Amino acid sequence: MTETLNIERTADLVAWLRGRGRLAANGPVECAVLAGGVSNRTVRVTQADRSLVVKQALARLRVKDDWFADPRRVHREALGLRRLAELTPPGSVPRFVDEDHEHHLLVMEAVPEPHENWKVRLLREGPDPDHVRQFGRLLGTLHARSRAEAGELREVFGDRSFFESLRLEPYYRRAAERQPRARGFIDELIAETRGIQETLVHGDYSPKNVLVHDGRLVLLDHEVIHFGDPTFDLGFSLTHFFGKALHRPAQRERFLEAVGVYWEEYSAAAGSPAKADGLEARAVRHTLACLLARVDGRSPLEYLDETERAVQRQVVLDLIPCPPPDIPGLARAVGERLAG
């Protein structure tokens, strides 16, 4: 498709929204380009007392490496947004408003002000135990409820092509190419992950995709959602606690304690499947793979400097020959290596 609409051009976006009946024909409109994402243009639009967020998927992502992805993924996000509203506690995701298949746009209600990105708050203040518990409970609830509706959701979300192009290839495959010592470990994990279909998997479960509003966490960015292996979500999210434990040594113990709090709350919400044979061990392996991917994949953690990336890489390479058996053991092993 030849692009005919760029939502960062205010006049074009306002005309499109009015044409769809999403804005009043008259009255002032304020548009603000939102930063933070690499895969979309995102604009907040406010008229009177209503605010919308409009997302437009990019074909070429805004990272140093060449990284291309099908912009039709925004419609998977639109589908995910509608279903997540049914599978998670009220207010956990923004309300879906509209989508445009021609220009690959998604419109949703904006999270009310004031709010703050949770990643920003974590880096500034460290983890609040209540927020960590909410983070674990939300994911556990999603996995538990989607497991109960597995038959329907497997059919609706069975296509994992966006997960392949946005996660397995740029994160795991690229890290394995750059670190041959990890190649066998990652290849085995990829094969295992492809063979598991247990729950709905968010695929981008990260503090950067969470806003804190009135003490509640609101989850964003669902374009990688699919039916698959829940332990990918666990590994992807736990990576951020470990990365920040490395980056913020003064808050290190709090971040490592948050790992245990998160896992306990997730397990309580997910129910007995969280203790199923192999699930926790898989979560450990995905955490190690994601930790390596966030220094050697296509999207490294931007707050880590080269010295910190070298430390995180070495921790993973030390642990993958014999991974810890459980999440608390992983937290201890990582903590010992960061301290030493």
Image: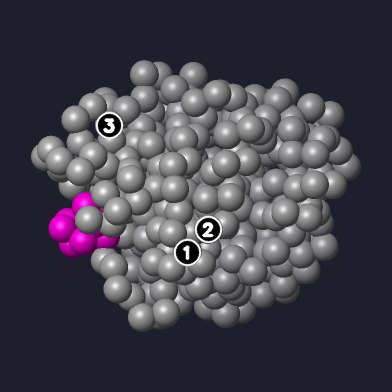
**Residue under pointer 2:** 75
Residue 265 % position (x, y): 65, 25
Residue drawn 55% across and 24% down? Answer: 90
Q: Amino acid at mark 3?
A: Arg
Q: Quick one: 321 or 191, which is closer to the camera?
A: 191
Residue drawn 86% across and 38% down? Answer: 276
**Residue under pointer 3:** 50
For the N terminus, the quadrant is: bottom left
**Residues at circles 2 and 3 in contact by the CB criterion of under 8 Å:** no
Q: Residues within 10 Å of mark 1 (few under 14, many from 20)?
A: few
Instruction: Determine whether the residue tagged by mark 2 lies in a helix, strand or loop.
Output: helix
Q: Quick one: 275 or 140, which is closer to the camera?
A: 140
Residue 25 visible in image: yes
**Residue under pointer 1:** 101
Q: Is residue 254 magenta?
A: no
**Residues at circles 1 and 3 in contact by the CB criterion of under 8 Å:** no
Q: Quick one: 241 or 140, which is closer to the camera?
A: 140
Residue drawn 36% across and 25% down? Answer: 213
Residue 24 % position (x, y): 23, 39
> Is the image coloured rainbow, by chain, by secondary structure, or in one colour?
one colour
What segment is highlighted magenta in the picture?
A: 7-14
Q: Amino acid at mark 2?
A: His
**Residues at circles 1 and 2 in contact by the CB criterion of under 8 Å:** yes
Instruction: Determine whether the residue tagged by mark 3 lies in a helix, strand or loop.
Output: strand
Q: Amino acid at mark 1?
A: His
Q: Is residue 77 above or below residue 103?
A: above
Residue 305 visible in image: no
The numbered mark, 1 or 2, whose residue comes first in the sequence reads 2
